[in-house]
């Protein structure tokens, strides 16, 4: 579970502009301007542990060889996206994450401070069809917009020294599919062939 918050030590005037006066003089120790809460839970703890261990190993390998900008970008994507890293040694995983954020801002119409709240529930998981085939999925729900967030399905095939993947986003503004074949070795991550198609057309 992660918490974060931002406090402002100064007061604001009737226009929402910060003034040179401490908030404690107006009866509060500080002004809460932002608050966030998030947590992630996995039904298969071995999957989360394996993912973290592999990310650490990948980071050490790339750092030792001199990380390129492309490799750094790939590592950041793997660290933030649970489905960006596929471990064929883990037969299944199902996890959920929740995030809540509240930010205060000045509303010029009501001329008062108001809170903007966002909260999202995400689900992601994977399962191995065979030792060489794996299916992953990711979806969620935005409680503020009252709609399903970007949903994707991916199929991976282990080709020994290569990986093949098929990704599909069945609905939404980013409805598309892509097929990618790439080398497994970290120093050869730029060696890949990708075919993408969306509602706007297709390209390699």
Image (cartoon, rainbow, N blue to C red):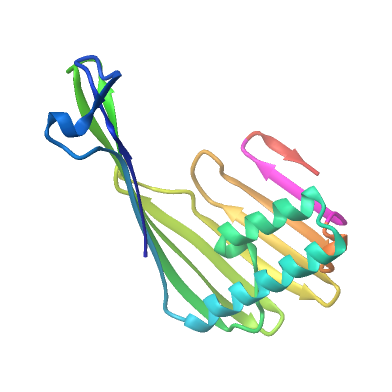
Establish if 159 lies above or below 38: below
Q: Is residue 183 visible?
A: no
Residue numbers of the magenta segment: 190-199
Main SS, magenta region, reads: strand
The quadrant in which residue 78 appears is: bottom right
- Labels in figure, total: 0
Q: Position of residue 175 (x, y in %)?
A: 56, 44
> Taking 127 as reference, is 65 left or right?
right
Establish if 63 lies above or below 47: above
The quadrant in which residue 156 appears is: bottom right
Establish if 173 lies above or below 179: above
Q: Residue at x 73, y 56 (%)?
A: 179
Assign the C terminus to one quadrant of the image: top right
- Looking at the image, which residue sits at the far left? 27
Assign the N terminus to one quadrant of the image: bottom left
Magenta span includes 177: no
Q: Position of residue 170 (x, y in %)?
A: 53, 51
- Judging depth in this view, the residue of 104 and 189 nearest the camera is 104
- Judging depth in this view, the residue of 200 and 5 nearest the camera is 5
> Taking 18 as reference, is 135 left or right?
right
Q: Residue at x 11, y 34 (%)?
A: 27
Q: Position of residue 197 (x, y in %)?
A: 69, 44
> Taking 149 as reference, is 28 left or right?
left
Q: Position of residue 182 (x, y in %)?
A: 82, 61
Q: Is residue 143 visible?
A: yes
């Amino acid at each position: 579970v992660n918490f974060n918050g931002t406090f402002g030590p100064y007061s604001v005037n009737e226009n929402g502009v910060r003034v040179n006066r401490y908030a404690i003089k107006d009866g509060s120790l500080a002004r809460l301007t932002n608050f966030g809460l998030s947590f992630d839970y996995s039904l298969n703890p071995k999957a989360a542990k394996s993912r973290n261990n592999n990310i650490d190993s990948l980071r050490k390998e790339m750092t030792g060889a001199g990380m390129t900008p492309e490799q750094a970008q790939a590592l950041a994507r793997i660290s933030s996206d649970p489905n960006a890293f596929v471990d064929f040694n883990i037969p299944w995983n199902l996890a959920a994450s929740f995030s809540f954020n509240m930010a205060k801002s000045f509303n010029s119409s009501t001329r008062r401070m108001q809170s903007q709240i966002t909260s999202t529930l995400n689900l992601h998981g994977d399962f191995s069809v065979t030792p060489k085939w794996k299916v992953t999925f990711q979806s969620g729900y935005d409680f503020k917009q009252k709609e399903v967030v970007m949903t994707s399905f991916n199929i991976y095939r282990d080709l020994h020294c290569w990986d093949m993947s098929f990704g599909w986003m069945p609905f939404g503004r980013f409805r598309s599919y892509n097929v990618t074949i790439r080398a497994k070795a970290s120093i050869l991550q730029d060696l890949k062939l990708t075919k993408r198609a969306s509602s706007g057309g297709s390209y390699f």
